Amino acid sequence: MSILQFEQALERIPTGAEHRLYLFVDGRQLPPYYQSYFPDEPIVESAAVYLYESDEEQSPYLLAVDDLVKQWFLRHRRGAEGFFFSSSWSIETLAEHFRQQIQVLSPYGTTSYLNMAHADVAWTLLSASCHWFWQPMDQVWLPTSLGWKVIDRSDFEPMVEFELPLQLTPVQWQQLSHIAWQSLLEAIYHHMKRHFPEVLFQQERGDLWVEAHAQIARQKGFVTRQDQLNYFNIIGWLGESAVAGEAYPDIYKLIHFPSQERTPTQRIRQAARCAKQYALGV
């Protein structure tokens, strides 16, 4: 295993006929690769892992890599939104393999989506010699939060066999929970930077401000990524007083009072719609 700087990693990621290289992308953080980016180039092989998507869970997806795909990812990534790996498997076989483990078990028996295309999540499983995750891979290039890691299958043999569905250990569960939280905070920060920059840049420490409000939203039951983005949209449209005070009674009620008729997701979605209507005067 080696840890590389960006330029070194770029040179070490092979492309060419002698290598079957794939890119696994976290669809929640990086929009799909569209052929319209490169209309004069051959169509890129791709495959989504989820057969059905929801507003809450966008599918991770696989891309067959050439130089354009590699440059596209390296240009658009902000953090650990995906990783490269070499494999002898076809892209359809890979997608079917990863569909077997869309959800994993916590140490307590509850199910959770596995954000399998996130580089830090992949590193957690690969470094534990997880046979199921390593099975289709020969070499892996991961832009983790600690830097680029280049790892070979042979360095992690013998593999540890796991039954499906994969049940995470307490340590792995803690690690993946931390990764998920940090990934959420990054997504919120970039969402505010893109859509409400004037609100974000009023803060002395935008990252700490985002985390503080995300904690409050989570305590009120708004736990999914879209829930959190809707919560921050309210702040973006109307200011912090709209989520903390009673300046907008209907929004205040939706945020602060649980309902038997509506889920937290439905409540915060409706609150965000109301906030936008107030802001636009419609």
Image (cartoon, rainbow, N blue to C red):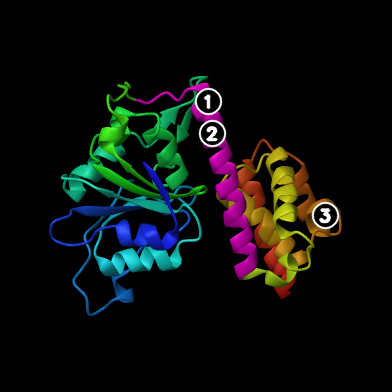
Q: Which residue is mark 2?
A: 175
Q: CA distance from mark 1 to mark 3?
A: 43 Å
Q: Secondary structure at mark 2?
A: helix
Image: 31 above or below 227: below
Q: Name the residue beneath numbered marker 3.
A: 249
Of the two numbered discs 2 and 3 in the rendering, the one whose residue sits closer to the viewer: 2
Q: Quadrant of residue 262 in the image?
A: top right
Q: Are marks 1 and 2 in contact (CB under 8 Å)?
A: yes
Cα distance in 3D space between marks 2 and 3: 39 Å
In contact (CB < 8 Å): disc 2 and disc 3: no
* Category of crowding for the residue at label 2, using alpha-carbon neighbours closer than 10 angstroms: few (below 14), some (14–19), many (at least 20): some
Residue occupying image coordinates x 29% and y 76%: 38
Q: Nearer the viewer, residue 151 or 175?
A: 151
Where is residue 95? Give x, y as percent. Answer: 25, 45
Instruction: Give the total number of marks visible in the rendering.
Output: 3
Do labels 1 and 3 touch, CB within 8 Å? no
Choose top left, top right, bottom left or bottom right for residue 278. bottom right
Magenta-colored span: 165-194
* Magenta span main SS: helix
Earlier along the polypeptide chain: callout 1 or callout 3? 1
